[in-house]
C-alpha cells in the first residue's frame, strides 16, 4: 500500500484523467502481486492454525491420531501450486506490468512535462536542456521557484546560454509538442563565442550579453522527451522474463571475459613479462640475491627502476579497478535478478512452513498478534533478501548465494518450528537453559547441608 500511495502522489492533482490514473495504479498493483502473495500466505497460515489451536479444535484433531504433518499436507500441496502461480507472475505478469507502467509514465510526462521535472536536481531528460529549480508548488505542481535553465547544450556549448528567474510557471497545452515556461523576474546570459575560436584564453576576451526581464516566455521542444524504443526499455532487468535474463547473462559474460583477457594480455606484454625466461648463459656463481650482483651505484639504479615500475603498475591497476568493478556489477545485476526471481517464487512455501507451526505454537487467532508476527517475519525475510542482493551485486558473495540467501536462512527455521510444533513444544524451551543453572545451585546447597 505504501508503494501505491507513493506512486499515486506523483500524479495526484496534475490534471491526469481518472482512466489513466486507474491504469497507472493497476500496473503497480500487478507488480506488487509477487510481494503481496507471500505475506498474505504467512498471515493467513498464522491466523488459521492459531485460531484452531486457540479454540482447542487442533487438540481434537491430534486426539484423533492426526499429526500436524498429515493435517497440513493438503495445504502444502496448495502452497506448491501457489508457488508455481507466483513463478508465473514473476516470469510473465511482472515484466509486462513493469513495461506498461514505464511506458505510461513516459506518456504522462509528455502530456504533463511537470511530472518529469524533479526539484533540487539538474533535469537533463529534454535533449539540449538542463533545468534546475528549488521547489514545485501550486495545486497542479506547475509553479517553480529559483529556476535555472541551461540550453543549446547539444551544440557543444556548456553554460554559454543561461536563463535565471525567481519564479516560473508551466502552461503546456495537452497534445502540444512544446513545453511553455513563463518566467518572472530574471536574467538572460549569453556568451558570444565564435565556434572557430573555442580556446579558453580567447573565449575569456569574447563579448557576452546580459538582459533582465520581468516576464519571459520559453518554448521548449519536448517531442523527443522519453523517446525510447522497445529495445531500450527491454534492457531494464525488471522488464525481462527469466529466459531473457538468462540470454542477457550469457550475452554480457562473453564480452566481459574478452575484456579481462585483453587487459591481462596487454599488461603482460607492456611490462615485459613475455620476455622473462631462463638465460642460457646462467652460471652457478650468479648470486640469487639480485642486488648482490651489482656495485653500490648499480644497486641504487636497480632499486629506483624497480620502484618506478611498481608505481606504474599500481597506477595502471588502480585505473582499471573501477572499470572492472562497474562491468562486474553490471553483470552481477542480471545474475542476481535471475536467482532472486527463482527464490522468491518459493517464498510462499517457505513462509508457510514458518507461519503454520508458529500459529499452532502461539495459539492465537484474529488480527492482533498474528499480524504483528507476520509483519516482523516478512520484514526480516525481505531484509535478508535485499541484503543478499546488494552483496551479490557488489561481488561480496556469488549471485546464487545472494539470490537464495533469504530462503537458505529462513527455511531451516521453518523446519525447526514444524518439528517443535509436532512435538507440542514452544518456540524456545526455557527449562533447557535454566535446568543446568538450577542444578548447579542445588548441588552447592546440597553440599553445604552435608557438611553441616
Image: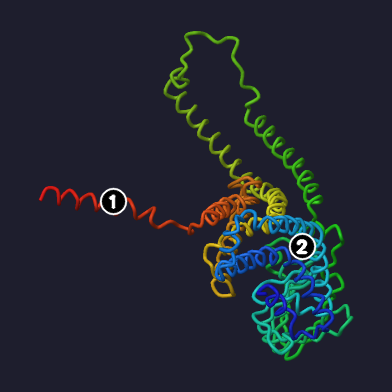
At mark 2, the secondary structure is loop
Asked whether the viewer can see residue 83, the reply is: yes
On the image, the x and y values in percent for residue 156 come to: 78, 64
Q: Earlier in the sequence, mark 2 or mark 1?
A: 2
Check residue 197 in the rendering and tell me which mark sits there, or answer none: 2
Total of numbered circles in the picture? 2
On the image, the x and y values in percent for residue 449 come to: 15, 51
At mark 1, the secondary structure is helix
Check residue 311 in the rendering and tell me which mark sits there, or answer none: none
Q: Is residue 132 above or below residue 304?
A: below
Q: Single out the residue that lies furthest toward the bottom.
A: 214
Q: Which residue is mark 1?
A: 439
User: Which of the two residues, 343 or 212, is positioned nearer the viewer here?
Assistant: 343
The answer to whether marks 2 and 1 mark residues whose Cβ atoms lie closer than 8 Å is no
The answer to which image quadrant residue 310 occupies is top right
Q: Single out the residue that lies furthest toward the left.
A: 452
The residue depicted at 54 percent of the width and 38 percent of the height is 311
Amino acid at each position: 500500500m505504501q508503494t501505491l500511495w507513493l506512486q499515486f502522489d506523483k500524479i495526484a492533482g496534475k490534471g491526469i484523467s481518472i482512466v489513466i490514473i486507474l491504469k497507472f495504479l493497476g500496473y503497480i498493483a500487478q507488480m506488487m502481486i509477487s510481494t503481496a502473495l507471500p505475506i498474505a500466505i504467512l498471515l493467513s497460515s498464522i491466523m488459521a492454525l492459531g485460531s484452531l489451536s486457540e479454540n482447542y479444535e487442533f487438540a481434537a484433531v491430534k486426539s484423533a491420531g492426526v499429526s500436524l504433518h498429515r493435517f497440513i499436507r493438503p495445504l502444502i500441496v496448495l502452497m506448491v501450486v501457489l508457488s508455481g502461480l507466483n513463478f508465473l507472475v514473476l516470469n510473465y505478469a511482472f515484466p509486462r506490468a513493469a513495461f506498461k507502467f514505464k511506458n505510461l509514465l513516459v506518456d504522462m510526462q509528455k502530456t504533463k512535462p511537470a511530472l518529469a521535472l524533479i526539484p533540487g536536481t539538474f533535469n537533463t531528460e529534454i535533449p539540449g536542456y538542463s533545468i534546475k529549480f528549488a521547489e514545485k508548488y501550486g495545486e497542479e505542481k506547475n509553479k517553480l521557484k529559483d529556476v535555472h535553465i541551461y540550453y543549446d547544450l547539444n551544440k557543444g556549448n556548456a553554460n554559454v546560454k543561461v536563463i535565471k528567474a525567481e519564479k516560473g510557471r508551466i502552461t503546456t497545452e495537452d497534445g502540444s509538442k512544446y513545453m511553455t515556461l513563463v518566467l518572472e523576474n530574471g536574467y538572460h546570459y549569453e556568451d558570444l563565442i565564435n565556434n572557430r575560436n573555442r580556446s579558453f584564453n580567447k573565449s575569456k576576451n569574447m563579448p557576452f550579453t546580459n538582459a533582465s526581464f520581468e516576464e519571459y516566455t520559453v518554448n521548449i521542444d519536448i517531442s523527443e522527451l522519453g523517446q525510447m524504443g522497445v529495445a531500450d526499455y527491454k534492457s531494464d532487468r525488471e522488464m525481462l522474463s527469466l529466459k531473457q535474463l538468462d540470454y542477457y547473462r550469457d550475452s554480457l559474460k562473453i564480452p566481459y571475459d574478452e575484456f579481462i583477457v585483453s587487459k591481462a594480455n596487454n599488461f603482460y606484454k607492456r611490462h615485459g613479462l613475455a620476455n622473462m625466461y631462463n638465460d642460457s648463459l646462467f652460471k652457478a656463481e650468479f648470486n640469487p640475491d639480485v642486488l648482490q650482483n651489482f656495485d653500490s651505484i648499480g644497486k641504487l639504479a636497480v632499486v629506483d627502476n624497480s620502484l618506478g615500475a611498481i608505481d606504474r603498475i599500481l597506477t595502471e591497476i588502480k585505473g582499471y579497478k573501477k572499470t572492472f568493478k562497474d562491468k562486474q556489477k553490471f553483470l552481477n545485476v542480471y545474475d542476481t535478478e535471475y536467482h532472486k526471481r527463482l527464490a522468491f517464487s518459493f517464498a510462499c512455501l517457505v513462509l508457510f512452513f514458518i507461519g503454520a507451526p508458529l500459529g499452532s505454537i502461539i495459539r492465537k487467532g484474529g488480527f492482533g498478534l498474528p499480524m504483528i508476527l507476520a509483519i516482523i517475519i516478512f520484514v526480516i525475510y525481505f531484509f535478508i533478501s535485499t541484503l543478499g542482493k546488494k552483496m551479490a551485486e557488489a561481488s561480496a558473495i556469488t549471485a546464487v548465494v545472494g539470490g537464495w540467501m533469504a530462503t537458505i536462512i529462513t527455511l531451516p527455521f521453518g523446519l525447526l518450528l514444524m518439528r517443535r510444533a509436532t512435538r507440542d513444544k514452544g518456540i524456545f524451551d526455557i527449562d533447557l537453559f535454566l535446568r543446568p543453572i538450577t542444578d548447579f545451585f542445588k548441588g552447592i546447597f546440597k553440599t553445604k547441608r552435608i557438611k553441616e
